[in-house]
Image (tube, rainbow, N blue to C red):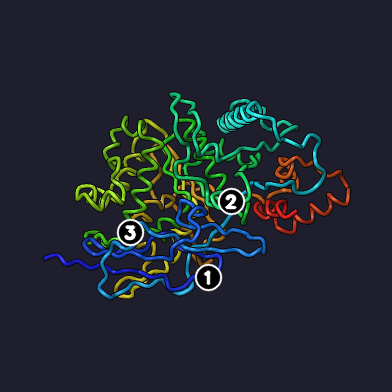
Amino acid sequence: MTTSLAIRAQPTGLRRGLGLGGGGLGLGGQREFGSTPTPTPDAAARNRFGYTAARRNKEGTHSLSLSPSPWDGKRRSDGRSLHRRQGQGLGLTRGFAASGAPEPPVGKKAKGGNTEGKGKAEKKAHAVSLQDVLGEVVEGATGAKSKIFKAKNPYPPLNLEDIAQGAKRSKGGQQGSLLPEGLPKGLGMELLGGPQVTCRPEMISFLRDVLSEEGHRKYLVDGGKGTGKSILLALLVAVARLNGWVVAYLPSATRVVQGGRFRLDEQTGLWENPDVAVEILQNIGTAHGAQLEELGLKHLLLAEGADSEAAQGDGGDQQAEEDSTQKLVDLLTGLASQDKYPFMVCADDYNALFGETGYTDYSDRPLSPHDMKLVCAFRWLERPEVKRGVVVAASSATVPVRKTVKIPETGDVSHVSLNPISYEEACAMWSKHGLEQPKQRSKEEQVLRNFVLGVNGDGHAIRDYSAML
């Protein structure tokens, strides 16, 4: 006889600046539970991870709310509840080296700053230049001769939004999105302008090292807040896919730990997350459907339309969705064991896989990430190396994990630390808005140097500074 139990979770606390990604937690084999978060008042500001961005209003204040889960109102409740501990949530960060201010920041305006009325010709030239820059990034990352770091343009800009919307692949001429997973969390929350990334020389050096056959097989990227870790991983994924790599990209590991509806696999004793597994499978299928078909792994993808809502009305689709976590585990294992295509596992906010979830189960036992199947599936730094490929993980400076928690690792792991944004790089970010670099030894230069030093090279603080002026 099989018993069924459904429990509904209510978030019990939320600190300013923290939030929960849509959905809740579920118990199941046959036991499951979901959450009913507060609806978002401004749906347009919601990003794909289930957050709403902190929006600055005229008074300088910020607002943050929770977005609804697709499972709201569709689960039974027997009066028992699973509670999220008071005051815990996801830390939202904008750690990136990007600029997006709509108005000129500091310094002199360059001549010819008025760009209104230049028409379609300018837009076409702008689009071509973005593709050219992306092409040179690829050439620089693969070791080919490139003019990208000549003195006239040592920090070329690159618009990640254009990459996410779609670019022509260099192999096979296939059209499709290079980042179906979406932009990194920092750029996804950007509300002040376009997500334009400053390509730093150390970023290109890192890409070249990772994509070379002689490089390390495992990388752990760290650095201070705003040094561009998330941007680096997104750019790496785009360039790798342009060069024919198969990439399993996790823009934020907090999505695996915090979001969705969990169910208990009673055979393994681990918690599965069908909602998030479906999302990851669909993204991999969008980016690499043809390659997976060649490898004989396409059967592990969900059939088109077998999403959460379709599962409500069709038993077969529902069963396929419930099996999605194991399908994703099998897909990652199959990709790691093949050698036809180079394979990369790329996970941002990697240290979230070792922190506390803030959830307790029906018996009030705290749930740790070690109890979750998807967490185990993405902890590749402590697993055997990929047969042909690499593992790249980046830790977050804002994920709430105890300092005593150390990320376990085995094998040849290369630790890469990103440097803070320098004054020259900050000027390159500001100059993209039509500003000239201040003269040497001038008072204005000293003020800007002191500011960059004062914020410790924090990329989003530098961008915010330009927006406030």
Residue drawn at x 37%, y 33% is 339
The residue identified by callout 2 is: 190
Q: Residue type at mark 1? A: Arg
The kind of secondary structure element at disc 2 is: loop
Q: Residue type at mark 2? A: Glu
The kind of secondary structure element at disc 1 is: loop
The residue identified by callout 1 is: 15
Asked if one can make out residue 304 in the rendered structure from this viewpoint, the answer is yes
Residue extending farthest to the front is 117
Please give the label number shown on residue 71: 3
| Residue 42 image position (x, y, % from top left) | 50, 58
Residue extending farthest to the top is 172
Foreground residue among 469 and 263: 469
Determine the CA span between mark 1 and mark 3.
24 Å
* 13 to the left or right of 278: right
Residue drawn at x 45%, y 24% is 173
- Of callouts 2 and 3, the N-terminal one: 3
Q: Residues within 10 Å of mark 2 (few under 14, many from 20)?
A: some
Asked if one can make out residue 215 in the rendered structure from this viewpoint, the answer is no
* 418 to the left or right of 64: right
Quarter holding residue 361: bottom left
- Of callouts 1 and 2, the N-terminal one: 1
- Of callouts 1 and 3, the N-terminal one: 1
Quarter holding residue 334: top left
| Residue 229 image position (x, y, % from top left) | 57, 49
